[in-house]
Amino acid sequence: MVDNTGAFYDGGEIITVSNFPDIDKIISPDGLKNLTITNTALTYNDGTNTRFLSDAVTSRMYAPNGADYISVGDSATYINDGIRSRIQIDGTHSYMFSPNGQKWVDIINSGLIIQGDTDINGIFTLTGDQVNFQMKAKTVGQKSVIGWYKSDGTRIGWLGHGTGANYDLTIRNEGVGGNVQLLADDGIVYINDYLKVSTLTGTGNDYVCVDSTGQMFRSSAGC
């Protein structure tokens, strides 16, 4: 049955409402759920929240809570947690974001970009030729270093350059009582330039000697 408003009835329940030319609506028998069609969009509502929306810009599928959604457009696809995008895929990037949106992983054609601190549990292997591991300072005038830490977060050593115009390469053991050892097993440790030691015991600068315990000392009279 059709009344003068354009509504169709089935057993007393409204099943469609037509308000041509602006809107058409299909309503469920319980009167709660509806599918609305306009000249610009198609929307499905479950009686509480919009669950699907399609218009000229995007198509969205919503979670039952009406907040989380998947959005597909001509240029990008998004998964949103109701507050911010958690996954974004477009023509040049594939992003995965942290819950607070401050950290992310970006996969592009030339490689992988990670924004934020990263913990890797397990073996981290780099395979390639030439330079495999590159460290680059983020700020002009600063340097990057490699630090070694105990499980409680205490730094016990680092390798890198100084700050500013200081380009000395430092290997430093900050562990109490720890040594710095250069071991070559059956080979030889080479120093291809001058070796300067500023804290040798002894006097004089003519000779550098090694005693019976393997300790080095200075001497002006020979070893």
Image (cartoon, rainbow, N blue to C red):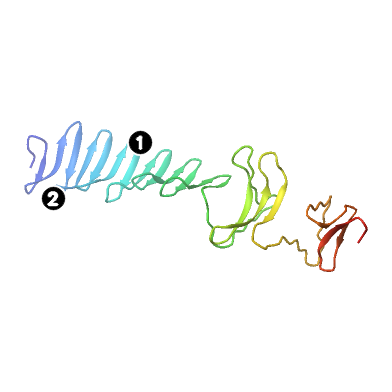
Q: In the image, residue 186 lies at what x, y percent?
A: 80, 67
Q: Nearer the viewer, residue 160 or 210?
A: 210
Q: Is residue 145 left or right of residue 11?
A: right
Q: Nearer the viewer, residue 211 or 104?
A: 211
In the rendered image, the vertical position of residue 190 relative to residue 13, given as above or below: below
In the rendered image, the vertical position of residue 122 relative to residue 17, given as above or below: below
Callout 2, which amino acid?
Asp
**Residue furthest toward the top?**
21
**Residue furthest toward the right?**
221
> For the point 8% across and 39% down, which residue is it?
2
Mark 1 — residue? 57
Q: Is residue 106 left or right of residue 84?
A: right
In the rendered image, the vertical position of residue 185 relative to residue 114, given as above or below: below
Q: In the image, residue 18 lies at what x, y percent?
A: 15, 36
- Within-10-Å neighbours for mark 2: few <14, some 14–19, many 20+: few
Q: In the image, residue 205 lies at what x, y percent?
A: 88, 52
Residue 45 lies in quadrant: top left
Q: Nearer the viewer, residue 212 or 85?
A: 212
For residue 133, which numbered disc appears in the image? Answer: none
> For the point 50% across and 43% down, which residue is it?
93
- Within-10-Å neighbours for mark 1: few <14, some 14–19, many 20+: few
Alpha-carbon span between mark 2 and mark 1: 32 Å
Mark 2 — residue? 30
